[in-house]
Structure formats: C-alpha cells, structure tokens
Image (cartoon, rainbow, N blue to C red):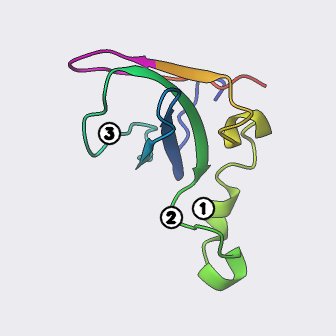
Amino acid sequence: MSGKALGAARINFVSSTTGTGVYADLQSDGSYELPNAIPAGDYRVYLTSAGLGDAPPSETGNQELKDALKDVPKKYQSEQSTDLLAVVKEGANSFDFDLKP
C-alpha cells in the first residue's frame, strides 16, 4: 500500500470461471507463494486477516493480525467488491498489487 509491503494478511485468489479459490499468507515483506499451481484463467483477488477465521481478537489474542487490514480500503477485503484481477497463464506467474484508496 502506497509503496509499502503489507504483511500479516492473507491473499485470496478466486476463479472467475469456477468459483474455486486458493490462498496464501503474506510474509512480513509482502511476498507470498501459493501452495499449489492453479489453472490458467482470470481470478478475483482480495485480502483477509491471516489465520483468524471469525474468532474475535479478544479470544485469539491476535489483535495485531486483526489490525493488519485496518488501513486497507474495504473494497479489497471482499470477493464481491474487489477490483483486483489476476490473469494466470500456464507456467510461472508473479503478481504484485498496488492497493489504492
């Protein structure tokens, strides 16, 4: 965001064709690696808090993780509202996303 890496978040890729998805947790430097290769196609991309699920921060003790998205515009936090798109091609792919307000 604004040229700075976003860590402590999860990046989600959801196929525009099949609706299936895959995710990876961002590293502190903002890098990520999907656990498996995904089929070529168009994917909607959005961010969620890493590793919290729906548990309240008071129960998990991970307010830091919950706060990781506090500065991320809401449109990037939902599959329905995101405008981030990744066009995955056969072979190796690399995607960097610049989140704009």
Q: Which mark is residue 29?
A: none
* Amino acid on which the number 3 mark rests in the picture: Glu
**Foreground tag (1 vs 2):** 2
Residue at image mark 2: 51
Decide: is 15 above or below 8.
above
Q: For mark 3, does the 10 Å Cα neighbourhood hold few (<14), some (14 to 19), or many (20 or more) residues?
A: few
Tell me the quadrant of the picture where the N terminus can be found: top right
Disc 3 versus disc 1: distance between alpha carbons? 19 Å
Q: Position of residue 95 (x, y in %)?
A: 42, 22
Q: Residue at x 63, y 64 (%)?
A: 64
Indicate which disc residue 33 carries: 3
Q: From which residue to which does the magenta span run?
A: 87-95
Does 36 lie within the magenta span? no
Secondary structure, mark 1, is helix
Residue nearest the viewer, comparing 39 with 72 = 39
Which residue corresponds to the image point at 53% horizontal and 27% vertical from the top-left? 16
Asked whether 90 falls inside the magenta stretch, the response is: yes
Q: Position of residue 20 (x, y in %)?
A: 45, 42
Give whichever of discs 3 and 1 has the lower sequence position: 3
Q: Which residue is mark 1?
A: 65
Q: Is residue 83 left or right of residue 22?
A: right
Distance in Å between CA atoms under marks 1 and 2: 8 Å
